[in-house]
Image (cartoon, rainbow, N blue to C red):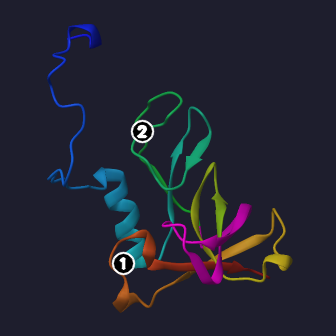
Amino acid sequence: MTFLERDPLAPQAWFGNLPAAHRYTYGLAGERFFRALKDEGKILGSYCPKCDRTYVPATAFCERCLGELTDWRDMGLVGELHTFTVLYVDVEGRPLETPQIVGLVSFGDGGIVHFLHADPESLVIGMPMRAVLKPPHERQGSILDIQYFEPFQA
């Protein structure tokens, strides 16, 4: 039905709560990625030999050639700071008592957006950042198993 064929007496808006149920699943690649993070404390990437790209977080198929990715690689816990921002308000627009820093830490040809623990004045694009994981008994198989990223000096 087109907009012009629409019943003019039909409701124009829905007021109140709209009940909806859903379930998010990681999929096969996400399951393997988060299980490795939880059980082994590893960040995995999936490699496409045809396109010479490594995806982090790992995916099941290459976004360029659509080939199935079966070569999984341990990316280590140290990535490179690609960008960051300082947050002064929460998602509701309320001021934060303490500003938070969120950044994109690159691994391979992808990366992870997460909290950073550092003085923002000390952060430099391109610097190494290390994932600080929760203790093994506290991990639940989610991105929050990474507590934060911090500057890393070898």
Is 146 situated above or below 3? Answer: below
Q: Residue at x 44, y 69 (%)?
A: 143
Residue 79 x, y percent position in the rendering: 67, 66
Quarter of the figure with residue 139:
bottom left
Q: Which amino acid, mark 2?
A: Phe
Residue 115 x, y percent position in the rendering: 59, 74
Q: Residue at x 44, y 75 (%)?
A: 144
Q: Main secondary structure of the magenta part?
A: strand
Q: Residue at x 38, y 66 (%)?
A: 34
Q: Which residues are magenta?
A: 76-101
Q: Are marks 2 and 1 in contact (CB under 8 Å)?
A: no
Q: Which amino acid, mark 1?
A: Asp
How far apart are the alpha carbons under marks 2 and 1?
A: 23 Å
> Which residue appears farthest toward the front when viewing the image?
9
Image position of 90 (left or right of 152): left
Quadrant for the C terminus, please.
bottom right
Quarter of the figure with residue 124:
bottom right
Q: Earlier in the sequence, mark 2 or mark 1?
A: 1
Is 60 situated above or below 107? Answer: above
Q: What residue does disc 2 label?
A: 61
Residue 53 x, y percent position in the rendering: 60, 42
Quarter of the figure with residue 40:
bottom left
Element assignment for label 2: loop
Between 110 and 21, the residue placed more toward the observer is 21
Q: What residue does disc 1 label?
A: 39
Is 14 situated above or below 30? Answer: above
Q: Residue at x 29, y 51 (%)?
A: 27
Is residue 132 covered in magenta? Answer: no
Between 4 and 75, the residue placed more toward the observer is 4
